[in-house]
């Protein structure tokens, strides 16, 4: 895999030369490894049921047979089967083995794939998005409207300890302004993580921002002017639409398939017909459809953009939440032309309240720092000190392993309950990471009406209409993940399924 040219002294040398590598997180503990293996079995069996390979009443592979085919122990497979039985997905029959529970049905993956649009469109979604965000922030509602770890899954104790240590040892510095680009040690730690992923970025390439949204805002400010066309995925994260609308830009949508991400042929179709100023993509577990764009497609898209000198803004907030053993590559890892600006944050993994994001700025670094200075000067100092120490102590990888397991299990439970309680004709994605399910409701279902009725019933959701400039996702719904699954969540999903059957147009 090609890497960007190194612009800083490699880790392992003295701190002032460029980097201070984090404390080695070490390999996952034996308990973590065992948990990963039986969760892998759970996902494997659940996916076979959801895809229709095993139907209600079908006998599942024996413990020994599945253990042999997956290269695992019988005990690991047995643990996974017991967990699936506890969730009501399968059932044990004396002297007969395990079977798919009667009444359990699979749901297809949404297949709708809109054609490339004929031209750019003005964005007019601000009012609806603001209404959705108000519901998302209401803690009294069952939280299907937001992708954010539950407080019990956040490392509050570790962060509290680190914050106390920082205030004892660096109180004066913590009370002062940070520099415009952000705390140097934090930028070193972030640059180190990118280097571990094959990106030769140094601390000077990192700009600390107030969450990923500010990073996206700065990138768009750097690369566009009012009236310009920005190519976005369809569906796309609604904050992209908010930013495009607020900056007076126009959006042109390229289809995103839940199972294959962005097709380079669709990108070329648009580039050949329109003067695009910049692209804004989320290639890894796109919010809301969870799609993963393959590596060969990423390379082909970058080559097309390089031919025309078009920059790409990469939203990378979900890549670390992969459910498989390896982290997907980013556009930035394949960028040999210096045209990618990556934006990410710790909001979905460590501390939403810290509002801490960053950019790998590349060529636009100087302009990005100027815009940051005129927007809010700098980020808060104390959280930056704390996050730098959190990374330096090697705690982030442990937190990611915990979240991957929790999110994967909740997504699996949600898919199974959707199959049980949503109306016939419903489809749902099977993402390999991230924390959102993209639900296609039967034709004629009004997703916005369902949003309002769900809110009245004490449930937050995000209607498909906020993820596009067009009306093509009117019967879609995004369900977010917080890593928990309990009776309150299950009852909320049952209520949502009942309401979905009632919200039909006409």
Image: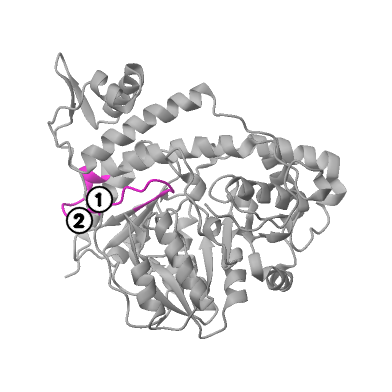
- On screen, residue 447 versus residue 203, left or right, reads left
- On screen, residue 320 versus residue 52, left or right, reads right
Q: Residue at x 47, y 26 (%)?
A: 33
Report the residue marked by disc 2: 501
| Quadrant assignment for the C terminus | bottom left
Question: Can the viewer see residue 117?
Answer: yes
Q: Secondary structure at mark 1?
A: helix
Residue 37: assigned label: none
Report the residue marked by disc 1: 497
Main secondary-structure element of the magenta-colored stretch:
loop
- Magenta region: which residues? 418-437
Q: Residue at x 30, y 22 (%)?
A: 67
Pinpoint residue 163: horizontal percent, then vertical percent. Answer: 74, 41
Q: Looking at the image, do the residues carrying marks 1 and 2 touch, with CB atoms under 8 Å apart? A: yes
Residues packed near mark 1 inside 10 Å, few (<14), some (14 to 19) or many (20 plus):
many
Asked if the magenta segment contains residue 427, the reply would be yes
- Relative vertical location of residue 153 with respect to residue 454 in this rendering, above or below: above
Q: Residue at x 79, y 58 (%)?
A: 178
Pinpoint residue 223: horizontal percent, then vertical percent. Answer: 59, 76
């Amino acid at each position: 895999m090609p890497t960007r040219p190194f612009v800083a002294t490699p880790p392992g040398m003295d701190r002032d030369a460029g980097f201070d590598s984090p404390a080695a997180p070490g390999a996952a503990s034996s308990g973590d490894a065992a948990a990963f293996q039986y969760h892998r079995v759970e996902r494997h069996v659940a996916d076979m049921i959801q895809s229709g390979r095993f139907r209600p009443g079908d006998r599942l592979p024996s413990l020994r047979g599945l253990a042999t085919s997956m290269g695992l122990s019988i005990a690991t497979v047995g643990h996974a089967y017991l967990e699936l039985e506890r969730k009501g997905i399968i059932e044990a029959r004396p002297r007969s083995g395990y079977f798919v529970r009667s009444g359990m049905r699979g749901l297809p993956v949404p297949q709708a794939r809109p054609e490339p649009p004929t031209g750019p469109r003005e964005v007019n979604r601000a009012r609806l998005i603001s209404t959705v965000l108000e519901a998302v922030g209401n803690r009294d509602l069952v939280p299907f409207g937001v992708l954010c770890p539950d407080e019990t899954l956040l490392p509050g104790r570790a962060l509290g300890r680190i914050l106390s240590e920082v205030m004892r040892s660096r109180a004066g510095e913590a009370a002062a302004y940070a520099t415009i680009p952000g705390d140097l040690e934090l930028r070193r730690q972030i640059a180190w993580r990118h280097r571990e992923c094959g990106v030769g970025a140094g601390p000077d390439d990192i700009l600390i921002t107030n969450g990923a949204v500010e990073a996206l805002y700065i990138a768009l400010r750097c690369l566009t002017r009012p009236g310009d066309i920005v190519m976005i995925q369809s569906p796309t994260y609604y904050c992209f639409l908010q930013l495009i609308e607020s900056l007076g830009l126009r959006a042109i949508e390229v289809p995103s398939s839940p199972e294959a991400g962005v097709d380079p042929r669709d990108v070329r179709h648009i580039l050949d017909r329109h003067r695009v100023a910049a692209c804004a993509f989320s290639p890894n577990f796109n919010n809301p459809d969870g799609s993963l764009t393959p590596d060969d497609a990423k390379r082909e898209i970058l080559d097309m953009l390089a031919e025309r000198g078009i920059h790409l803004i990469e939203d990378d907030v979900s890549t670390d939440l992969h459910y498989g053993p390896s982290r997907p590559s980013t556009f930035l890892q394949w960028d040999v032309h210096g045209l990618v600006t990556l934006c990410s944050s710790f909001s979905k993994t460590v501390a939403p309240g810290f509002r801490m994001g960053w950019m790998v700025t590349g060529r636009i670094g100087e302009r990005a720092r100027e815009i940051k200075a005129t927007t809010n000067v700098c980020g808060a100092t104390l959280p930056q000190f704390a996050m730098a120490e959190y990374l330096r102590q090697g705690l982030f990888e442990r937190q990611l392993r915990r979240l991957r397991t929790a999110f994967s299990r909740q997504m699996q439970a949600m898919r199974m309950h959707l199959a049980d309680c949503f109306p016939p004709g419903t489809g749902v994605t099977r993402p390999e990471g991230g924390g959102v399910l993209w639900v296609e409701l039967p034709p004629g279902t009004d997703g916005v009406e369902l949003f309002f009725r769900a809110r009245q019933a004490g449930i937050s959701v995000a209607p498909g209409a906020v993820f596009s400039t067009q009306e093509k996702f009117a019967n879609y719904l995004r369900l977010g993940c917080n890593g928990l699954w309990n009776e309150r969540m299950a009852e909320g999903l049952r209520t949502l399924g009942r309401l979905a059957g009632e919200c039909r147009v006409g």
